[in-house]
Image: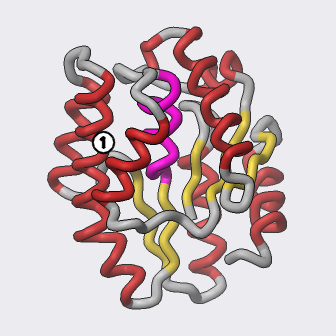
Amino acid sequence: MTFEGVDGSGKSTQAELLRDALVAEGRDVLLTREPGGTEVGERVRELVLDGPEMTPWAEAALFAAARAELVARVVRPALDRGADVIADRYVDSSLAYQGIARGVGVEHVLELNLHVVQGLMPDVTVLLLLDTAEAGRRVGAPDRLERAGADFHRRVDAAYRELAERFPERIVAIDASRPAAELSELIRERLRSRI
């Protein structure tokens, strides 16, 4: 399962809370973040979050490269051993940020990513919806993407909402304006039959 949303929407917090709840039930759980989780992924993270400006296609390709490493070296082995995998961002981030908000095209970015993840898509994606101004207030020291400006973040928010309409069988959109503990309970309730 994956967690998605604009920066500051609470993805990381909710992914950690769900992991903790599932571990408390005795389940084997792997929590990943993107980009990251492998040596290549961490170096890509530094480049895309703290590096120079780059073209949208370069950004999409770098995220895809990090994702390819993560799936091959970490996610697939965990799934093969029967673990639950929770990802703090995955393919939908690239669809929203580069595919729609940066104008590369959803189909182009999806095609690239389906190749690099060898077709591995989440069973369910939790999309945390939060007003972009509120999300911006929650962000600490901003990275390169977080400094892209309010208009860009509104486009990302609209892109995620578009993806939720496009993939309703997989994406569960939830209002993220609630306190973290209350939101965590709501997420577990909404996913009870799927996890």
* Camera-nearest residue between 184 and 34: 34
Q: Position of residue 52 (x, y in %)?
A: 20, 17
For the C terminus, the image quarter is: bottom right
Q: What residue would you read off at disc 1?
A: 63
Is 94 part of what is drawn in magenta? yes
Camera sees residue 92: yes
Q: Which of 35 and 27 is in front in this view?
A: 35
At numbered mark 1, what does the secondary structure look like: helix, strand or loop? helix
- Locate residue 139: give its quadrant: top right
Q: Give the image location of residue 186, x and y in percent.
A: 83, 58
Range covered by the magenta-colored residues: 88-101
Residue 105 position, x and y percent, is: 45, 31
Q: In which quarter of the image is the N terminus?
A: bottom right
At x 48%, y 37%, the residue is 106
- Which x, y percent locates residue 190? 81, 64
Image height of 9 relative to 118, above or below: above
The quadrant where residue 45 appears:
top left
Could you tell me which residue is drawn at 44 percent across and 21 percent down?
102
